[in-house]
Image (cartoon, rainbow, N blue to C red):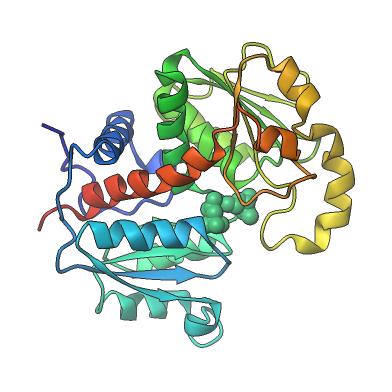
Amino acid sequence: MIPVLASLRGRDFLDVADLDPAELRSVLALAHAIKAGRWAERPLAGRHIAMLFQKPSNRTRVSFEVGIARLGGTTTTLGEQDVQFGRRETVHDAARVLDRYVDGIVARMRSHADLVELAAGAEKPVINALTDRSHPCQILADLMTLEEACGPLGAQRVVYIGDGNNIAASLIEAAALLGFRLTVITPPGYEPTPQVLERAGSIGSGTSGVLISNDVAALDGATAIYTDVWTSMGQEDQRATRSKIFAPYQVNKKLMDAAKDAVFLHCLPAHRGEEVTDEVIDGPRSIVFDQAGNRLYAQMALLAEIMGPR
Ligand code: CP
Ligand code: NVA
């Protein structure tokens, strides 16, 4: 019997910190059960989800569309040129309209503030498919993958190396909720914001297990090394500067040798030769494609808990 909590029903999921530890554990347990074929219900039968993308996507878009279909639901996916938030109509007006057609909204917005406005305008549940501030659905899959590869999270030390933006922020919230140790290593000036650390400090066990560092050698006890692109979507004009600043933070063979037995994670897409070398991402310690695959099961579990049976 797989427990599906009722407490998530009808709620938005804008950040990992929107969940409490029990809710996060429940989503992960259901995700493992779905992957193992131990849970195959169709709680989204007769439900329709709008998928809104202001930025490109491969994993998020396809894994949500497939997951919603497997749960019995249907989707409409709209790109940047369709809704044209802020140009054809305000985010709030668009949300009030969509609310009358669909049962839930999955949205990848350029700005987190716009996602918050979308959620405020829609009574139906809104799920964050990535913003500049966070990527909580990615982190659900990451946690699931770490449990598969390394066992209970409580015994792990995840070392994230790179930009302290959306992935780092959501990882910090997960570490606070589940109590695993996390080191975030960034170049000076690219650390997670004080607001992220403040919010994480107020949830779960707080940030006592979270270390922020600029020292690329702070790898002691790492069970997983995680990196992300140096230039996120929407920052392309900063690419040349960032390539120089982040160069010492590349995850290469030397760094992985220093991290001993740690597995390697990356949310993808990867900019090979920048934040990670081919040797690492294609090497035996890389679990990046399992991680990408787990987006499907983690999001199905999330949707099942949020949308649930009527
Ligand atoms: N990791 C991730 O969100 O990938 P996409 O940008 O392809 O959706
Ligand atoms: N930090 C990256 C994550 C992509 C999944 C970006 O925002 O582009």
Q: Quadrant of ligand 1?
A: bottom right
Left or right position of 299 against 159: left
Q: Can residue 214 be seen in this view?
A: no
Whole-percent x, y for residue 177 in the image: 41, 28
Q: Which of 261 and 121 is in front in this view?
A: 261
Which quadrant of the view contains residue 98?
A: bottom left
Whole-percent x, y for residue 31 in the image: 30, 39
Whole-percent x, y for residue 191 in the image: 71, 37
Question: Vertically, is 78 above or below 284?
Answer: below
> So how many labels did they put on this image?
0
Residue at (33% x, 54% y) in the render? 12
Question: Vertically, is 176 above or below 155?
Answer: below
Which part of the image, by quadrant, shows the C terminus? bottom left
Q: Nearer the viewer, residue 277 or 24?
A: 277
Left or right position of 22 against 285: left
Whole-percent x, y for residue 171 in the image: 53, 35
Residue at (28% x, 45% y) in the render? 301
In the picture as drawn, the residue positioned furthest to the bottom comes out as 88
Which part of the image, by quadrant, shows the N terminus? top left
Left or right position of 233 against 306: right
Which quadrant of the view contains residue 284?
A: top right
Residue at (43% x, 61% y) in the render? 62
